[in-house]
Amino acid sequence: MTVRPATGTLRSEAAFERAKLVTPGGVNSPVRAFRSVGGTPRFIASSSGAYLYDVDGNELVDLVCSWGPMLLGHAHPDVIGAVADAAARGTSYGAPTLAEVDLAAEIIDRMPVEQVRLVNSGTEATMSVLRLARGVTGRDKIIKFAGCYHGHVDALLAAAGSGVATLSIPGTPGVTDATIADTIVVGYNDRDAVRDAFTSFGDEIAAVITEAAPGNMGVIPPGTEDGIGFNAFLVGIAHDHGALLISDEVMTGFRVSRSGQFGLDGVRPDLMTFGKVMGGGFPAAAFGGRADLMQNLAPVGTVYQAGTLSGNPLATTAGLVTLRLATQEVYEQIDRTAAQLRAEVRAALAAAGVPHVIQNAGNLFSVFFVAEGVTAVPDYATATQQSTAAYAAFFHSMLRSGVYLPPSAYEAWFLSAAHDDRAVNRIVDALPAAAAAASASG
Ligand SMILES: Cc1ncc(COP(=O)(O)O)c(C=O)c1O
């Protein structure tokens, strides 16, 4: 293993001080600020394959992968080449392009959707899909699950995961009571709570929205009861009451299999949202579903939705090349790497006597530093019991060894096809010290 000698963090520290003067918290998305693990975020200068290079000259094995998009690794030459070609032809036209149609067709080929509309972010996708669900059902209420994060849509920030969980923000000032009055929040995997909500508000509920497999409160796979998976239960109960199931595959889509979580559990929702991998590292996302529902969107129908940069030619090019390169072999390779890492992390933590639970949805996984005796984390309430101090100690030890983990205990670890033996060996070598640090933290 060759670890490039660390040159410290002075440049990142100076950049962070400067950044804090010009933008709140010095970052453009809260979790990047390292608040829950402490210390200074690394400012990144460049990336390649499995590695990030910070402005201080450190080489870091990246287990964040831009929070999911970089399935093929950073700066994949085919993606960069295609984007450079596209950029030379112009960066935005405000008129239809062939690449948009090709990307939509690729998504439809992989996912149980008949039509899609391209947007710029996962947030925009979930915001738009809620409007559509409400528009077609004529109902206002939605059910969401505590700890699921669907972007910073006002109605969906109630008991949200990701940065909201990381920063322990109970609710968000600026979101009106009226906006969240129609949001019913229930515990993930809690079937009785879902039944109760439908019993109380059945004919007012437009949709249930769920992460296909939650990854924003740590990874919490949908549970199975009497042979029926949670997603299958949700689609059944929603349809019994004339409501829709919206499956948010922004994180899992095109990542946990070529067809996302749908590829693992086969549950067909009415509407879906996508993002991250399908943009190949550019701002692109989508929502889609049954044609009879999607046909309610303007200009065919009356539910309005639009975007100046939607279907941007650089983003659609990057997404299309990424998806076309994301073959079955790529998924199998990432699955193998993920399984190996889960086993290595488990062994290192066990050797250091650190109580933990590792959960996964396909190749997406995370580690919970739980209390002794806890064997599973089925919901957000349990996730919040984990030791974030242990995670912080573990995180910083890994960082000192040249491994960049998500700077929050509530986030999934993301791998790419570029995580080869060299990268994996660096991670494995770093684990004993990190496990010892976690052990010493509490
Ligand atoms: C499941 C899920 N939905 C929606 C979003 C929001 O996507 P974006 O950050 O692109 O707005 C995220 C972001 O992490 C996500 O994980």
Image: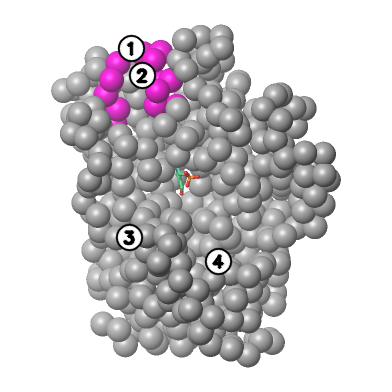
Q: Determine the residue positioned at 48% across, 51% down.
A: 361
Few, some or many C-alpha atoms within 10 Å of disc 3 (few <14, some 14-19, many ≥20)?
many
Q: Secondary structure at mark 1?
A: loop
Q: Secondary structure at mark 4?
A: loop
Query: Percent x, y for residue 133?
Result: 40, 20
Query: Percent x, y for residue 224?
Result: 37, 42
Visible residue check, residue 352: no
Q: Determine the residue positioned at 43% across, 56% down.
A: 29
At label 4, the amino acid type is Leu
At label 1, the amino acid type is Gly
First reached walking from the N terminus: tag 3 or tag 2 = 2
Callout 2–callout 1 Cβ contact below 8 Å: yes
Q: Which mark is residue 138?
A: 1
Query: Percent x, y for residue 272?
Result: 50, 30
Left or right, 432 with reference to 357: right
| Image depth: mark 4 or mark 3 in front | 3
Q: In this rendering, is residue 318 above or below 47?
A: above
At label 3, the amino acid type is Thr
Q: Which mark is residue 320?
A: none
Left or right, 103 with reference to 187: right
Name the residue furthest left.
200
Q: Secondary structure at mark 2?
A: helix
Q: Which mark is residue 166?
A: 3
First reached walking from the N terminus: tag 4 or tag 3 = 4
User: What's the magenta region?
Assistant: 129-143
> Where does label 4 land, which residue?
63
Q: CA distance from mark 2 to mark 4?
A: 37 Å
